[in-house]
Amino acid sequence: MQLVVVGNGGSYDLIKFRKVTGYPGILLTDPSLESYKILKFKNSLADVVGIKSFIQGFSALRSGFMPGSLQGHALQLGGAVVVVPEGKITYLFKSSAAGDHPPVEDLLAAAI
């Protein structure tokens, strides 16, 4: 099994992401947002600045996480996808607001 992280910034953003996170795995970028469109991930101002995003952001700040510089498309929300070697999607999580993340247990269960 391999973990691949896909962002939507420029190739220079991948270097910064690796430096900030220490993530050693495969990093890809899709500045065209085609993969995000295919997966129908949200991309609107209402999803980024809504009350849920505010609550998520405040919670992150209280936990000691400080926002970094903007990378990629500011309105594009992400998600998580588990694709098995046969090419079948076994798990799809679409963020409903900025800071919305899938339960780790669900991701791990789908990857087994």
Image (cartoon, helix red, strand yellow):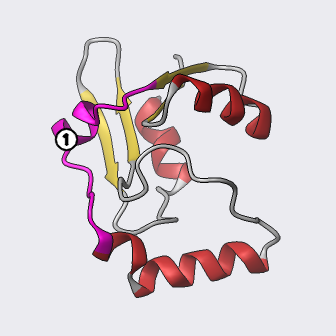
Residue most toward the right? 64
66 is higher (above) or lower (below) than 84? below
Q: Nearer the viewer, residue 5 or 16?
A: 16
Q: How many marks?
A: 1
The x and y percentages for residue 72 are: 47, 43
The x and y percentages for residue 5 are: 52, 30
Q: Quadrant of residue 86?
A: top left
Q: Nearer the viewer, residue 22 or 68?
A: 68
14 is higher (above) or lower (below) than 59? above
The x and y percentages for residue 91 are: 32, 41
- Label 1, on which residue? 37
18 is higher (above) or lower (below) than 42? above
What residue lies at 48% left-to-right and 22% top-to-bottom?
28
Q: Which residues are magenta?
A: 29-45
What residue lies at 39% left-to-right and 49% top-to-bottom?
78
Q: Amino acid at mark 1?
A: Lys
